[in-house]
Image: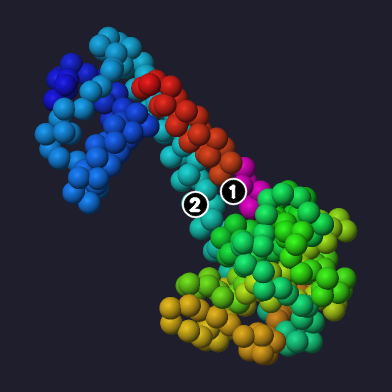
Amino acid sequence: ICFALDRFDSDFIKHYFDSLKWYREIYMISAEGARNHGLLNVPTEDFFATLHTLPMNTAEQRRIAEFLDLLTAKIEKHQALVDNLKKYKRGVSEQLFEQIKSKSTQHVFSSIFVLLQNNTFSRELLTNEETEMQNIHYGDVLIKYGSCVDIDKEDVPYIKSDAPVDKFAPESYLMSGDIVIADTAEDYTVGKATEIINPNNKKILSGLHTIPCRPVMSFAPMFMGYYLNSSSFRSQIMPLIQGTKVSSIGKTQLMKTTVYIPPVDEQKRIADFLYSIDTKINLLSETADKMIQLKSAMLQQLFI
């Protein structure tokens, strides 16, 4: 090998192997192997012949390693806090929605929601460039959005100008409090819901593989978004899921489910509490992401 490991700080070498320069060296070798043999591989002799430009001063190596170790520890701490808060939220959400059943009125889903029209536009008809109309895509409901999607804050895609949107009546545009449910998924996340908040008169349609619903009675903001994603409600969804490779749920089955509705002040208390947890989770996640980006940039700069 081109350097003797006993001349380098072991933690420093560990971070070097995480750097972009290391991956670039290995990728170039493996790509050459693919051209010659049709396989991505790194021959042993080529691996040991890679060239590396590294500081020889062990004190400097140690300082770099200690800083990167500290940054890594902070990232792991924030990620652990996020995981713990998510677990706590799941547990407390389950308890809250089970406890309210005794003080709630029971309603059939179809008696408190009306269905809206959705579109069948694929991702190819969506864009990040601003147009007249936005679109809630089922993939974003499943992965990107939480129990509520704040239109003012979230990056909601737009529908391309040449898409046929004229056939959709203004009544189909999503309003604050409307619910969008993903009716298709590759796993048991099917049926995940998100509540629309802060649309601010924007024209927004519900997209492919979604069931948009509008409440016919008033609820505390965000309550229904959290309730429809709770295990208390989703326990009714699970037996209704159809399909093997792709899971789906139909509108007819959904409309027959039972919804427990507590008094409005109780709805507000639950929604505010769960939203406060989500706010902490998002803040910690954003901080962790920024530290990951900082570490990646530093690794790139340090090992150019």
Q: Nearer the viewer, residue 180 or 105?
A: 180
Residue type at mark 1?
Ile
The segment highlighted magenta reads 276-284
Is residue 273 visible to us here?
Answer: no
Is the stretch drawn in magenta largely helix, strand or loop? Answer: helix
Q: How many marks?
A: 2
Q: Quadrant of residue 302?
A: top left
Q: Is residue 292 left or right of residue 1?
A: right
Is residue 116 visible to us here?
Answer: yes
Residue highlighted by disc 1? 281
Q: Is residue 21 left or right of residue 98?
A: left
Q: Position of residue 285 (x, y in %)?
A: 56, 44
Number of the label disc, if any, that sits on residue 84: 2
Label 2's element? helix
Determine the residue positioned at 40% across, 27% down.
299
* Of marks 2 and 1, the one in the foreground: 1
Of callouts 2 and 1, which one flags the residue occurring earlier in the amino acid sequence?
Answer: 2
Q: Quadrant of residue 139?
A: bottom right
Q: Position of residue 213 (x, y in %)?
A: 75, 76
